[in-house]
Amino acid sequence: MNPLNEQCACRCIHQNQIDAALKDDLSDRDRANLAALFKAMGDPNRLRILWALQNREMCVCDLAKFIGVTESAISHQLRMLRQLHLVANRRQGPILYYRLSDDHVSALINLAREHLHEER
């Protein structure tokens, strides 16, 4: 066995580990979707929106006031979060109310926060 990986000219010490990781690797689609999800949650304002929606529904104007940006800016952020299935909305007359799509969104945020607060 050649100890150099021909794709990158890297040493290969444990081919069985590489083979196992390749077998378990994410699909291209899952990688792209997960990266988009973490990118969306990586923006401080979008994260604040998600945090605010954990225990309540809020309308665009209230979220704009909370974050300190325009309603247009909040609508843009909410559109991205909705496309990623992180938030859902309901209409009551002319007002759209937003909430987290499901408990998984809250769980992701809280798990990451718990990880940050662990004592090392």
Image (spheres, rainbow, N blue to C red):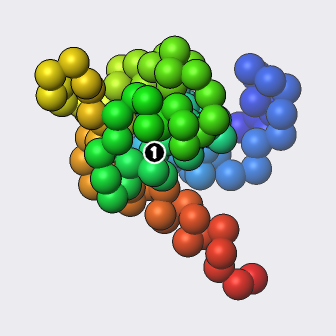
| Front in this rendered view, residue 97 or 44 | 97
Q: Quadrant of the N terminus?
A: top right
Picture layout, residue 101 above or below residue 82: below
Instruction: Say left or right for 39 vs 62.
Output: right
- Dividing the picture into quarters, in which one does residue 85 lie? top left
Q: Residue furthest bottom?
A: 119
* Residue receiving disc 1: 50
Q: Amino acid at mark 1?
A: Leu
Picture layout, residue 97 above or below residue 6: below
Residue 22 showing in the rendered view: no
Residue drawn at x 74%, y 20% is: 7
Residue 120 showing in the rendered view: yes
Q: Position of residue 93 (x, y in %)?
A: 15, 22
Badge 1 element: helix
Q: Position of residue 33 (x, y in %)?
A: 44, 27
Q: Quadrant of the C terminus?
A: bottom right
- Dividing the picture into quarters, in which one does residue 68 lie? top right
